[in-house]
Image (cartoon, grey):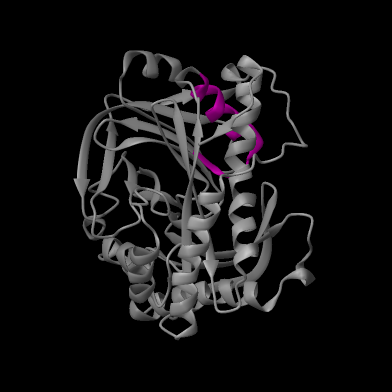
């Protein structure tokens, strides 16, 4: 079905929820730009929502032409030679130098106590990514990351993006709202006692922010569990989970989303200063990277932070990679963290491309 959408040029959405074997897809009919603050589950029922990083820019709601279809990802699954020893290709010196300069801008501001944490992102471009392998890439992401939210959408007004996010943003299910404070990154083979003060502080600031937003909306009764380690592919993060009654923000869901987004997991803390510093240090528009997205259905919704994602087009894939910078951060470590995060998508692109053409991936 995804091949048919791509061949015909019809806009579409495909996604697979965490922990589920079944994926869904639909051809897009109506599309509507809107402000995040305008969101209500009732007004956007049956839509797929894609919100950008910048709150000031429009989010998009995409509705199906008719209905939503089951998508058997196994039908796309050719025998993939999973390469456990996949090594990331080296990147050009100028890419490394650009990151170091951006890091210095952030670090100088942090040392001056302008902010406590800023998430610095960069891009990595993969060339020679033919369109015909994209359905298999989506399928393989579903197979490789069963606990991620895997998605693939294409619309001329919105763009073509794919990703496998490990992070819940906000979800409503059975009259309960859930969110998380997810941050800090280590290789999955390292254990809990290996977390250092920088990583604990980085994740702790996300929790502080979520606590502040809940207090702002008068929510004092909520369940809070963590932090605890959680695996995401070859990485492990620290996560604190929150649950509270949906009725607490019944008439202000959109405003709550706007207050919560972006959390310090992808922006920084304090929020406004971090956003300003990101604008100074990053020389590109993040687009939907580190925004949020997901389906709305019958008054419920499941939104995920759009990390481990890539923008697709013109036989290339642009990956977006970020990491939280604090005063204790070391530039070399932060650079390596972005490369570790690149493995999520690059390892799958590499395996699928080798399966089709026996060619390796190439970086620009």
Name above or below for residue 223 compared with residue 2.
below
Magenta region, residue range: 133-150
Between 169 and 299, the residue placed more toward the observer is 169
Give the number of callouts: 0
Residue at the spot 38% in from the left edge and 53% down from the top edge: 291
Query: What is the x, y in percent for residue 341?
Result: 60, 50
Location of the N terminus by quadrant is: top left
Residue 80 visible in the picture:
yes
Residue 221 visible in the picture:
no
Name above or below for residue 210 compared with residue 59.
below
Residue at the spot 47% in from the left edge and 25% down from the top edge: 70
Query: What is the x, y in percent for residue 157?
Result: 24, 35
Q: Quadrant location of residue 174?
A: bottom left
Between 335 and 301, the residue placed more toward the observer is 335
- Tell me the chief SS of the magenta region: helix
Residue at the spot 51% in from the left edge and 30% down from the top edge: 23
Name above or below for residue 337 compared with residue 59.
below
On the rendered structure, is 59 left or right of 215? Answer: left
Is residue 328 part of the magenta span, yes or no? no
Name above or below for residue 277 compared with residue 321.
below
Residue at the spot 44% in from the left edge and 61% down from the top edge: 177
On the rendered structure, is 20 left or right of 275? Answer: right
Query: What is the x, y in percent for residue 102?
Result: 46, 64
């Amino acid at each position: 079905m995804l091949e048919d959408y791509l061949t015909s040029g019809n806009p579409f959405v495909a996604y697979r929820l965490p922990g589920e074997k079944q994926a869904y897809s639909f051809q897009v009919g109506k599309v509507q730009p809107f402000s995040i603050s305008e969101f209500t589950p009732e007004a956007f029922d049956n839509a797929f929502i894609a919100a950008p990083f910048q709150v000031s820019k429009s989010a998009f709601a995409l509705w199906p032409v008719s209905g939503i279809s089951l998508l058997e990802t196994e039908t796309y699954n050719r025998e993939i030679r999973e390469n456990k020893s996949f090594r990331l290709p080296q990147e050009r010196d100028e890419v490394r130098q650009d990151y170091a300069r951006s890091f210095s801008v952030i670090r100088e501001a942090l040392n001056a106590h302008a902010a406590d944490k800023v998430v610095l992102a960069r891009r990595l471009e993969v060339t020679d990514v033919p369109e015909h392998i994209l359905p298999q890439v989506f399928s393989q992401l579903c197979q490789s990351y069963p606990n991620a939210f895997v998605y693939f959408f294409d619309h001329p007004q919105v763009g073509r993006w794919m990703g496998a996010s490990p992070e819940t943003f906000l979800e409503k299910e059975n009259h309960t709202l859930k969110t998380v404070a997810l941050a800090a990154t280590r290789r999955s083979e390292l254990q809990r006692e290996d977390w250092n003060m920088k990583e604990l502080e980085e994740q702790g600031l996300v929790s502080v922010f979520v606590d502040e937003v809940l207090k702002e909306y008068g929510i004092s009764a909520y369940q809070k569990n963590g932090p605890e380690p959680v695996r995401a592919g070859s990485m492990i993060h620290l996560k604190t989970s929150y649950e509270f009654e949906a009725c607490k923000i019944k008439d202000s869901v959109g405003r709550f989303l706007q207050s919560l987004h972006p959390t310090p997991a992808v922006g920084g803390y304090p929020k406004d200063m971090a956003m300003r510093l990101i604008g100074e240090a990053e020389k590109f528009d993040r687009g939907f990277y580190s925004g949020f997205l997901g389906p709305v259905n019958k008054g419920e919704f499941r939104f995920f932070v759009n990390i481990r994602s890539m923008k697709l087009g013109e036989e290339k894939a642009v990956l977006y990679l970020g990491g939280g910078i604090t005063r204790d951060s070391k530039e070399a470590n932060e650079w390596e963290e972005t490369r570790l995060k690149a493995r999520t998508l690059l390892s799958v692109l590499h395996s699928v491309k080798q399966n089709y053409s026996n060619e390796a991936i190439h970086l620009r």
